[in-house]
Amino acid sequence: MTDVSQLFDRLNSLLDRIEPLLVDSTPACDWQAPAFYWRSTKSGGYLQAVYDPHHIDLEALQNVDQQKKAILRNTRQFAQGLPANNILLTGARGTGKSTLIKSCWYLQKDLVKLIEIDKPDLGDLGQLLTILAQMPDERFIVYCDDLSFEEGEHQYKALKSALDGSIIAPRDNVVFYATSNRRHLLPHKMSENLETDLVDGDIRPGDAVEEKTSLSERFGLWLSFYPFRQEEYMSAAQTWVESMGGQWSDEVRAAALRWSMARGSRSGRVAWQFARDYVGNQRLQ
């Protein structure tokens, strides 16, 4: 039995060596699609076309007017071939960070293509940027949701190089948009504060702190999102209920309040989930 197990182990090892040498069987990219999802494989990766991308009407997003204006303006600049920044959206969960990116992009989808890449696949950024370099007449937003790293995760180094730091100059036809629930994308330890020095009256952070803040600073535009106050949550709930064909009333308001208390959270996402539950239940009855 041991000999059989060893044989399977050797066969698996041999297959792992041979697989990268096999003829590339990844599907050809359809550049006519408006959006793409990066699929990582053992032999590299490829762009999967997304013909009907998810988006929500921009007017439905409540209580983020300043953030909305900033993303819209930056995206329009980029779509018109003007200088534009990479954007990092940070803050409270459920406040519409990722939805806002997709909604602002959708208004420019005829001029800009959206590419979503998952955090574990950021190591493939070099390959992805090489592919995009072959399409100089197209413009791309590379988007990563829920971007944060724990100790021992090293994908952030590939992102740092792609944003600013590689010997290859950043291309004018690619910008990065990312969301995160925390402002500093890498975890900070209390012990790292002990490395801080006082030099001629100036506070100088230690090397560990500098390393961990350098990634966030490569995003030119930072936008913060905050938890909703009760009236902001109610406004969002009313908007969603009415957009789904329901009627807003004192009874619905009370139900929305009970829903948020049961969830222990007030946000645009919670308001949307309440509206789906309430309106769906009303129609069922």
Image (spheres, rainbow, N blue to C red):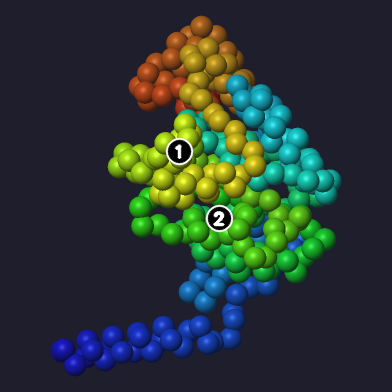
Say which quarter of the image contains residue 249.
top right
The residue at which mark 1 appears reads as 199
Q: Earlier in the sequence, mark 2 or mark 1?
A: 2
State whether residue 98 appears in this view. Answer: no
Dot 2 amino acid type: Lys
- The residue positioned 75% from the left and 35% from the top of the image is 73
Tell me if label 2 and label 1 are in contact, CB under 8 Å: no
The residue at which mark 2 appears reads as 160
- The picture places residue 271, in percent across and down from the top left corner, at 51, 24
- The picture places residue 218, in percent across and down from the top left corner, at 59, 47
Near-viewer residue (117 or 158): 158
Q: How many marks?
A: 2
Looking at the image, residue 219 sits to the left or right of residue 190; the answer is right
Near-viewer residue (64 or 168): 168
State whether residue 83 appears in this view. Answer: yes
Q: Residues within 10 Å of mark 2 (few under 14, many from 20)?
A: some
- The residue positioned 57% from the left and 44% from the top of the image is 217
Q: Is residue 173 placed above or below 100 in the rendered structure?
A: below
Q: Quadrant of the N terminus?
A: bottom left
Q: Residues within 10 Å of mark 1 (few under 14, many from 20)?
A: few
- The residue positioned 66% from the left and 25% from the top of the image is 66
Dot 1 amino acid type: Val
Q: Residue 268 — which label?
A: none
- The picture places residue 158, in percent across and down from the top left corner, at 53, 61
Label 1 element class: strand
Task: Measure the alpha-carbon separation of dots 2 and 1.
Answer: 28 Å
Q: Is residue 5 placed above or below 110 in the rendered structure?
A: below
In the image, which is nearer the foreground, mark 2 or mark 1?
Answer: 1
Q: Is residue 16 placed above or below 143 in the rendered structure?
A: below
Spot the residue most to the left.
1
Near-viewer residue (210 or 152): 210
Looking at the image, residue 265 sits to the left or right of residue 174; the answer is left
